Image (cartoon, helix red, strand yellow):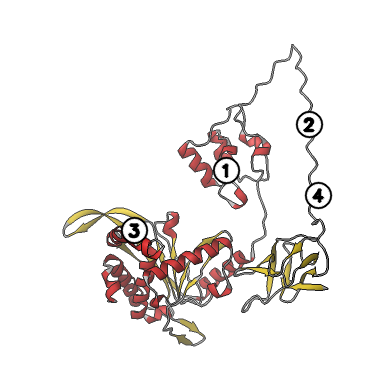
Amino acid sequence: MVNAVKVPPLGESVTEATVAKWLKKVGEMVKADETLLELETDKVTLEVNAPVTGVLTSVSAAEGATVGVGDLLGELDASATASAPQAAAAPAPAPVAPAPQAAPVSAPAPIAASPTAPTAASLDPKLSPAVRKIAEENALNLSAIAGSGKDGRLIKGDVLQAVASGAAPSVSPSVSVANVAQGPLEERVKMSRLRQRIAVRLKEAQNTAAMLTTFNEIDMGAVMATRKRYQEAFEKKHGVKLGFMSFFTKACVLALKEIPAINAEIQGDEIVYKNYYDISVAVSSPQGLVVPVVRGADHMSFADVEKTIGLLGRKAKDGKLSMEDMTGGTFTITNGGIFGSLMSTPILNPPQSGILGMHKIEERPRVIDGKIEIRPMMYVALSYDHRLVDGREAVTFLVRVKECIEDPERLLLDI
């Protein structure tokens, strides 16, 4: 019996998806509920599972194809037996190069490259101009550097780190990396649906909201001391590390309760005030920036917040976030400090009216009781929709967050 595999419902307001990856090949036996392929929407990556146990007999939508809800993806035959999967033809073995003939006595012998010199086969053929330039200037052996970009490609940060650490051996000065690593100077790649959605939403925020950003700085000394004092006991009891995000999440909830406009949104000519606190947390994933939601953060303990953020982070990394994980947030927190950002103006996550930006902790001089002390300081930024939130409210919100972080006991006493 032949069973059709169709595009399942993709979620609210989502009608199309892209076939990201087939995990099974035609002719291969598949068990019921085993993942057949992955679909990428503008919000999440969805797995499509086999409805029955059988053999995949046909694929109707190849990787990269755009499909709609209900479209045919392929067919499974429950009565068929598995055959050899259809796969791409194996590349023919490379011909053995003939041994080089001895050069005439009268001809000067060519200068041999260093044994550590990279070969064209050992280098990424799609190196960016910046990577190629740095490698050439520093005579780096790129084959000895691990790439952290997509599909293991070398990015600018990889070669800069190699130069700083001296980790990559040099090639012979007579070997030009530019000559060895010939490749296209440009690469044209279609934007993923998630990246397209990010672009649309961010531009929508700029075009719609009257965005404004206010700044402050926070002395992180008290929170850092608290973490150091209780980290071991906290992790032993709860099985998760005590991080900064739980402090900032609880501080934001307390401040949102005092300034409800920042937890509200505009719908037409009405303001919708929300008496629940679902905090969106910006997470960097291989597919792009995603913003899963910590629901009911006001009812959570510090351990619950840390566990939830950790779980959402792992799901984002593995491409397992669901539509439910991504929708319904009332306020957003983003931490550019983990990438080294010292200060930024975060963009609103529509239809929300506020987003808090955390940044890098840096030791700076600060005057305390008439004396200069070196303290661990963090700049924080609140971007808000000025159509709904006044400057006084935005500044008050940020001051409350600052007070809670500099005196964490306020979070326990809810003051």
Q: Which mark is residue 206?
A: none
Residue 240 lies left or right of residue 88; in this view the side is: left
Quadrant containing the C terminus is bottom left
Tell me the residue at 50%/37% (across/down). 167
Q: Residue at x 69, y 17 (%)?
A: 109
Of the two numbered discs 2 and 3 in the rendering, the one whose residue sits closer to the viewer: 3
Residue 214 visible within the image: no
**Tag nearer the camera, 1 or 2:** 2
Image quarter where the N terminus lies is bottom right
| Farthest top residue in view | 106
Q: CA distance from mark 3 to mark 1?
A: 42 Å
Numbered tag placed on residue 96 in the rendering: 2
Position of residue 104 measured from the top left corner of the image (x, y, whole percent) = 76, 14
Disc 3 is placed on an element classified as: helix
Between the C-alphas of marks 1 and 2, the distance is 32 Å
- Residue under pointer 3: 232
**Label 4 vs 2, first from the N-terminus:** 4
Q: Amino acid at mark 2?
A: Val
Tag 4 secondary structure? loop
Q: Which residue is mark 4?
A: 89
State which tag comes first along the sequence, 4 or 3.
4
Q: Is residue 258 above or below residue 316?
A: below
Tag 4: residue type? Ala
Mark closer to the chain start, 4 or 1: 4
Q: Earlier in the sequence, mark 1 or mark 2?
A: 2
Marks 2/3: CA–CA distance: 60 Å
